[in-house]
């Protein structure tokens, strides 16, 4: 049983790496990043998380739902989201269409309910309602460390867009240490480093990029060396 659990976690980690590798193909241009501010780091992140959450949601909740009504409500909201009907997916305005918000409010004690709060937060983020998004994301909890890391990363983006850059950096740091998955840790360590660099906290930025240089060179393709040099002059 333990071997089966470890294999499942290993497979989930591999799937997560593939999602992030796809994202890295569209990595931020360094010069463009420096011309903008830390808020630019959040662009596209919601799309990434929705993709990852869709996979984890299927694995954890659809294959073995503990609460059929909660799952049914969640799936209805997910279908609306897939169809591009974000307002309907968000829901919360009628019993007939609970959406993610209604599913959380009704089944918040279940895993499906908590995931619904997360998805609702991501939709609010995309709509530009960053405080609402932050509050909803904060309601999510999971025993899956990768999902928790993604939660903190999304909350960091909310804080950045609320012009709370220092808090955003602290949350990105939290995301970097939340998971045992190597690529997830690398991704958010780099995010924290770039936020620190944008805030001109060069000592902190150097710490993050040095960690990448020491532990995650396989994922970084030597980019950390360039960022470490930037901390000396930027």
Image (cartoon, rainbow, N blue to C red):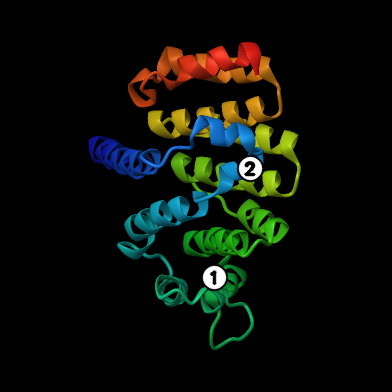
Residue 32 in the image, given as x and y percentages of width and height: 55, 36
Residue 75 in the image, given as x and y percentages of width and height: 41, 73
Please say whether residue 138 is visible from this viewpoint: yes
Q: Which mark is residue 26?
A: none
Q: Is residue 25 left or right of residue 214?
A: left
Q: Quadrant of residue 125?
A: bottom right
Residue 43 in the image, given as x and y percentages of width and height: 54, 49
In space, the residues marked 1 and 2 are separated at their CA atoms by 21 Å
Residue drawn at the location 47% of the way across and 74% of the way down: 77
Q: Say few, some or many: other residues with alpha carbon within 10 Å of mark 2 (under 14 / 14 to 19 / 20 or more).
A: many
Q: Which mark is residue 100?
A: 1
Residue drawn at the location 47% of the way across and 14% of the way down: 225
Which quadrant does the C terminus fall into? top right
User: Height in image: 215 above or below 29?
Assistant: above
Disc 2 on helix, strand or loop? Answer: helix
Residue drawn at the location 65% of the way across and 26% of the way down: 196
User: Residue under circle 2?
Assistant: 156
């Amino acid at each position: 049983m333990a071997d089966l659990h470890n294999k499942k976690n290993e497979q989930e980690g591999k799937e997560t790496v593939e999602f992030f590798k796809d994202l890295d193909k569209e990595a931020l241009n360094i010069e463009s990043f420096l011309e903008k501010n830390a808020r630019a780091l959040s662009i596209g992140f919601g799309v990434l998380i929705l993709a990852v959450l869709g996979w984890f949601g299927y694995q954890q909740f659809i294959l073995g739902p503990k609460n059929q009504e909660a799952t049914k409500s969640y799936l209805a909201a997910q279908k609306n989201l897939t169809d591009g009907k974000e307002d309907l997916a968000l829901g919360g305005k009628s019993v007939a269409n609970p959406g993610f918000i209604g599913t959380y409010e009704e089944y918040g004690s279940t895993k499906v309910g908590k995931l619904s709060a997360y998805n609702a937060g991501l939709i609010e983020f995309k709509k530009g309602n960053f405080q609402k998004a932050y509050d909803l994301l904060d309601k999510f909890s999971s025993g899956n460390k990768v999902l928790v890391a993604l939660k903190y990363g999304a909350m960091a983006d909310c804080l950045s867009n609320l012009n709370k850059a220092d808090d955003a950096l602290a949350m990105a740091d939290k995301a970097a240490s939340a998971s045992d998955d190597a690529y997830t840790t690398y991704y958010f360590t780099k995010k924290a480093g770039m936020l620190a660099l944008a805030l001109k906290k060069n000592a902190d930025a150097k710490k993050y990029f040095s960690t990448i240089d020491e532990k995650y060179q396989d994922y970084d393709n030597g980019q950390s060396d360039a960022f470490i040099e930037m901390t000396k002059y930027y």
